[in-house]
């Protein structure tokens, strides 16, 4: 054998020895760090019942999928300032990879931070982000509900009072409503805050003699407004124009002011497409029924469970092209990352909102 042949034989022998050594050696498990998911929910305050149900739904989905995640929940109490603090903790201290946020009231405050950090974010309620960014809204576009409500009110009433809150999403609700109402039909308009003089504003409203009034307000402010209206309207007959926000919190309203004031109140809301399978699984796990939006939260967790199986660099593209048959129906986003709109009309009858059939 010449030198070259000896070298080749030697290399082959070494390679064979290494290969057999590798085969005979026990394979050590590869340690993979869990993906960190930060979740900002209203776990205290007037809307805690939403946050609690959403939290349970998220935990249920990740348990079922056995996803390799660490979920960190933060409470914003339906307060924008608390949401910003929660965001900073999740991104700067916990270093989360993905964010889930619930509140429409919190979103405008944290959106500049989301945009700056370019963190993949799944928003449960209306996000107001209509740009191609890192935000995906799992609730169908809901402002269109208020255009529909304006259209119904235009056909039903000659004069309307427009009452709404100062939160960004409430102002937008009012704007969409106004687009479908002739200007001369809105005889009184007021934006109310928590510190407003409700009694004085109600007196001004009643002086204009509208046939109906909106109340696009938070629960606390809505209750204050209705109490002032009940105290001062006397024999005046004035209808209420309800909305999806009232529907979702109707139990609190009834407890505070009774149900009679809402009788025949029209509303527009998203269709309830929550699957029976999800309801059953949720009830078996927690002993109570999931409320509206729990199915959205569940579907977000399902999307993330699939997403994290792929390289992080592909997450945005995968999310944009997702088509999931989930607990809330088919989840599919438009080109801006917002779920496509849907609506149906409801009416309050005998203590509850039911589907209105023309």
Image (cartoon, rainbow, N blue to C red):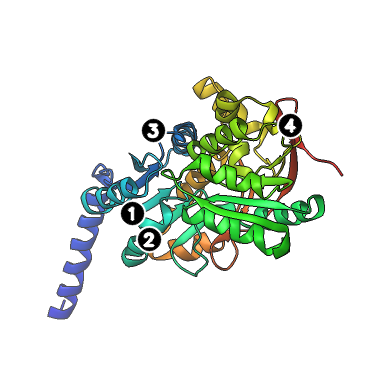
Q: Quadrant of the N terminus?
A: bottom left
Query: Left or right: where does residue 5 sit relative to residue 144?
Result: left
Identity of the residue drawn at 70% across and 47% down: 209
- Residue on which the image places disc 2: 312
Real-space Cα distance between discs 3 and 2? 33 Å
Mark linked to residue 44: 3
Q: Earlier in the sequence, mark 3 or mark 1?
A: 3
Real-space Cα distance between discs 3 and 1? 25 Å
Query: CB of mark 3 within 8 Å of CB of mark 2?
Result: no
Q: Secondary structure at mark 1?
A: loop
Residue ranking furthest to the left: 3
Say which of marks 3 and 4 sits in front: 4
Query: CB of mark 1 within 8 Å of CB of mark 2?
Result: yes
Q: Secondary structure at mark 2?
A: helix
Real-space Cα distance between discs 1 and 2? 9 Å
Q: Position of residue 30 (x, y in %)?
A: 28, 47
Q: Position of residue 7 (x, y in %)?
A: 15, 74
Q: Position of residue 65 (x, y in %)?
A: 48, 39
Identity of the residue drawn at 18% across and 62% down: 14
Real-space Cα distance between discs 3 and 4? 30 Å
Identity of the residue drawn at 31% across and 45% down: 82
Say which of marks 4 and 1 sits in front: 4
- Pick the residue in front: 41 or 154: 154
Mark linked to residue 263: 4
Q: Earlier in the sequence, mark 3 or mark 4?
A: 3
Real-space Cα distance between discs 4 and 1? 47 Å
Identity of the residue drawn at 51% across and 35% down: 224
- Residue on which the image places disc 1: 97
Q: Quadrant of the C terminus?
A: top right
């Amino acid at each position: 054998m010449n030198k070259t042949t000896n070298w080749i034989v030697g290399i082959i022998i070494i390679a064979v020895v290494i290969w057999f050594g590798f085969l005979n050696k026990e394979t050590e498990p590869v340690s993979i760090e869990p993906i960190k998911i930060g979740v900002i929910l209203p776990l205290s305050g007037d809307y805690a019942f939403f946050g609690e149900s959403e939290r349970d739904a998220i935990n249920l989905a990740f348990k079922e999928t056995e996803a390799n995640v660490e979920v960190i929940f933060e409470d914003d109490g339906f307060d924008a300032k608390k949401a910003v603090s929660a965001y900073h903790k999740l991104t700067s201290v916990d270093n989360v990879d993905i964010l889930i946020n619930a509140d429409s009231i919190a979103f405008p405050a944290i959106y500049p931070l989301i945009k700056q950090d370019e963190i993949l974010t799944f928003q449960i309620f209306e996000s107001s982000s209509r740009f191609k960014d890192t935000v995906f809204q799992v609730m169908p576009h809901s402002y269109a509900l208020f255009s529909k409500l304006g259209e119904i009110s235009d056909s039903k009433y000659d004069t309307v009072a427009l009452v709404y809150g100062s939160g960004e999403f409430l102002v937008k609700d009012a704007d969409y409503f106004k687009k479908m109402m002739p200007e001369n039909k809105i005889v009184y308009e007021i934006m109310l805050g928590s510190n407003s003089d409700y009694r004085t504003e109600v007196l001004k409203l009643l002086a204009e003699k509208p046939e109906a009034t909106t109340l696009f307000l938070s629960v606390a402010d809505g209750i204050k407004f209705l109490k002032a209206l009940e105290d001062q309207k006397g024999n005046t007959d004035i209808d209420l124009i309800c909305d999806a926000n009232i529907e979702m919190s109707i139990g609190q309203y009834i407890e505070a002011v009774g149900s009679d004031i809402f009788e025949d109140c029209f509303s527009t809301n998203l269709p309830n497409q929550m699957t029976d399978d999800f309801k059953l699984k949720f009830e078996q796990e927690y002993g109570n029924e999931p409320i509206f939006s729990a199915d959205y939260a569940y579907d977000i967790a399902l999307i993330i469970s699939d997403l994290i199986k792929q390289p992080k660099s592909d997450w945005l593209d995968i999310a944009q092209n997702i088509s999931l048959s989930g607990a809330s129906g088919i989840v599919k986003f438009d080109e801006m990352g917002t779920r496509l709109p849907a609506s149906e009309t409801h009416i309050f009858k005998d203590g509850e909102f039911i589907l209105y059939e023309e």
